[in-house]
Amino acid sequence: MIHLSDIELTLFSGSIPVPILRGINAQIETGSRVSIVGPSGSGKSSLLAILGGIERPTGGTVEIDGVDFASLDEDGLALFRRGRIGILFQSFHLIPTMTAAENVRLPLEIAGDDDIRGKAAEALADVGLEHRADHYPGQLSGGEQQRVGIARSLIIRPSLLLADEPTGNLDGTTGRQIIDLIFKMQDRHSITMILVTHDRALAEACDQRFEMSDGRLRRCEDVATQAVRA
Amino acid sequence: MNSLVAIDVARRDLRGSLKSFVVLYACLALGVAAICAVGLLNNSVTVALERDARILLGGDIAIDVASQPLDAAELDGLLPEGAPYSKTVDTNSIAVAGNGRSVPVSIKAVDQAYPLLGEVLTGTGQFSATSLAADEVLVDPTLLPRLGVEQNDLVRIGQAQFKVRDTVLSEPDRIGGVIGVGPRALLSVEGLERAGIVLPGSLVRYYYRVILPEGVSSAAYEDRMELLNPERRWRIRDAEGLQPQIARLTNRLSSYLTLAGLASLLIGGCGVAIASQHYFRRKQNSIATLKCLGAQGADIAAIYVAQILIVSLLGVVAGLALGTLLPLAIYLLPVGLLPVRVEFSFSVTPVIVAALFGLGTALLFTILPLARARRVSPAQIFRTVHETSSPTPRRPELLVIAGFMLLLMLLVFLTIDQLKLAIIALGGAAALVIVLTVMARLAVRGAQWIAARTQGPIRMAFHGLARPGAPTSSVIVALGCGLGVLATVTLLQHNLMAELQRGVPDRAPAVVLLDIQPDQQRAVRELLAQTEGVEVLQALPMLRARVTRIGGETIDPETLGDGVRWTTRRDRGLTYLAEKPEHTELLAGEWWPQDYDGPPLVSIEDELAEGFGVGIGDTLTFNVLGRPLTAEIASLRREIDYTSGRLDFIFILNPTALESAPHTIITSLDVASDVEAELLNRLAQDFPNVTPISVGQVIDRATSILQRIGFAVQAVAIVTIVSGILVLIGAVNSARSTQLYEASIFKVLGARRRDLLSIFLGEYACLGLISGFIGVIIGTVAAWAVVRFVFQFVWSFSLLATLQVILAAVVLALLIGALGLWRDLAQPAWRLLRAE
């Protein structure tokens, strides 16, 4: 279960405060598939960063599986992330000088896990890239790079998968293949997934849908109700 | 694109980038400053030498002769009529204060004409020989506290008391200032006679400095005198001959220092390569954009060559400014330290040479990064391509590199006027670069191998080293080179000190007594026998003579080997012995019978015989105090081991050949340290003409000279190490953005800041360790070669010294690597990743 309560994030441009998130409240059930849509600069990715414990909110509380993020320091958050949170990026963020297999192994290596080679091979096979294990990111297509990203984010068997516009850099067909793969993996491992996307159709395929606008988060049902009232 | 447009585009493209070249400026500036400063300093010294050569010699010509002064007939034959001349006498003695303290002194006795040229500087001002009374002495300022006396106090030299009239700070004709058994004591010739220390066979040298009449060429005069006196016992020198002699020394020193500057510049070249590679990598998108807009490879090359020239010029100009200011430090040196008054003299040649070296190096080391930049695909603008391996240089690029190398080599040959040294330096540099590059490549391969077989932080640290595009090889070459020099210097010093220490306690005598008259020998022996803790090690007769003929032929020094020419330049020590000394090994011939009474026989070193081109049965003719003495070579001995501490002579004759000639006895003693001072004072009291030399003090002086030389050599090592450090800083800077990007991904994947620190610091520690290890290997080989073949000592390896170098390398790499890392790692990963 994820609890977000009065989350605020204000950054500074020089000495001028720039509010990014303005009082966000939400509850997300374990195992659910959640989408967040909204225009660029509305704060979607910042919210994802806060959910991943990568960015600290300037106000409010984040609680995941009963753990209050405020009680964890930077290292505590890193340790929390290790076993529970996988993250997918729009621009993949693979390390260009490491092969696909080496990129996939990284989270296990950081966690000090054993049998990393076997698990990495398995994770790559799950995304259909076992034959590309020794290729560098520069030698892979965009779709293939994102598959490596998926394998890397799922190798730790996370309970929460955060996906920041994972198909944003891919063509339609490849994007659909990637989404099918993500959904299949999410189902298989019963992972809670929060998906930030511009793709309305993709958002519709999720159990819970939110819309972000000017730093505020609303459930799409609420948005629809307001629209009907208007 | 014409060149003006290229320069304009280059200038605009450089906006905001100039500060990213700080390491490049520093690398170039350091090397250029060193070369420029050494060049200007050498020029200033050369100008001063040309100006003061006559003063240094003390006249147009100087004649010197050992043991006995020139007699009136010889002087008449040698000096042009009416030519002004000055006579001085150099010898050693011991100065004794009223409080009983004694110190050996280097005596110089001068006549009233001294100095013919230049000035003697004294503590109270200038000096006039005419006012120096026969009972007065001028002394080196360091002698006063050692004797515990002050100005106007009395000191005894030989048999006479002298009033300390003043201190002597510099003599115009004293070069160097380290020769002699102790500090200077300046007397009048009459004063020396009063002292009564010059007895037959004493170690004494007479100098006659002459001003030639107008229009007489000193070189021609010198040649004529040598030709007229083939059997001479004296030596003649002229100012023109002296000047190149000193100039050779300063040129040689300047060549070594220039090479050190060049080494630092070449190490800095690695920094230039890293900085430019990093810059071009950041510029890939700009280059791709320019290509999309129609720029061709040649246009790209023109723009970026212009940029490199602009930034290199900034570094070179900074180096030239620094290099011009540094020589001004000569004005801070104490008066009298240098033999001539050196004034800063600007010359444009060293500045141009340093600038050419700087620009040549900058361009040489940017060719490959530039070539890669030229090859950037316009498609890059759509899709970032990361290098997974270094592209192989193409033939035109290799040709340009070869061209620049030739240019730099040409400059080296023009700058270093000793062809042999230049060839050795270039050959050595090439070998070093090849060895270091091979080692660096092997190290990177090793890191790859380890990264492939390990996991966790160790794998990531080694992956960081082996990462394609990482500047690991350049850093290892640069830092390894600097550390190699440091290791060489450290190990050489260790060996020199070890040799000194090894030689001193067991084998070297504690005191050597010079100038014991034969009739004093018994009394001296009695005194020594009475003193507890004193043991006589050796007592040998000694006199001085010059070799004038080899195998009956007059000597032509030019035909002699380099290693033996010195033995004929002036008089050398001779001894006579009935029996073969205990430790002497004969390689050929036989020792004369104990009671041999036939024609003179001589035993010489085998290497000397080889250099002279003579063997058993050939003859050598000596000029012994004006009398020729021809001796047949009876035996050849193994080369003298000077480290044995035994008294030994290159020429040993049979007793009857020399017994009747005036000579003295040289005696070596082993003295317990607690009775040494008392013995020296007692000897000074009873035998004022005998000069005791405390070997301990000589060793101390040798050690302090070695330490001073060591300091100079260390300064060279420091310059190269600083270059290595600059390269390391450049490498750390260039790798930092990649590291931060990776760190952000690691963070997102759950790494803590301390995990990241351990990965990156592990990477730096490995880099330091590898560079240190390679530096130590190179340093050990170099130091071993010098110790074994140049010094001819027993090699002694110091594990401690090498571990210190490795530790220094690791600490250095960690410190530089850690600079700002903690702060940089605190940057929010998410924002950094989104910015990518």
Image (cartoon, coloured by chain):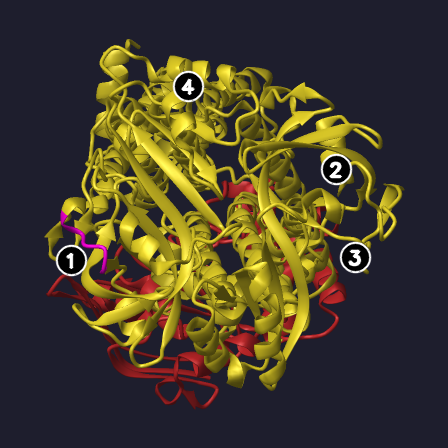
Chain colours: A red, B yellow
- Are the numbered discs 2 and 4 placed on the same chain, yes or no? yes
Where is mark 4, residue-wise?
Answer: B222
Is B132 colored magenta in this rendering?
yes
Q: Earlier in the sequence, mark 3 or mark 4?
A: 4
Where is mark 1, residue-wise?
Answer: B123
| Image position of B383 with respect to B229: above or below | below
Q: Amino acid at mark 2?
A: Glu
Q: Amino acid at mark 1?
A: Gly
Q: x, y (%) of residue B179?
A: 43, 51
Is there any visible trace of residue A225 in the rendered image? no
Question: Mark 3 and mark 2 in contact (Cβ < 8 Å)?
Answer: no
Q: Amino acid at mark 4?
A: Glu
- Are the numbered discs 1 and 2 placed on the same chain, yes or no? yes
Q: Describe the element under mark 2 as helix, strand or loop.
A: helix
Where is mark 2, residue-wise?
Answer: B607
Span shown in magenta = B131-136
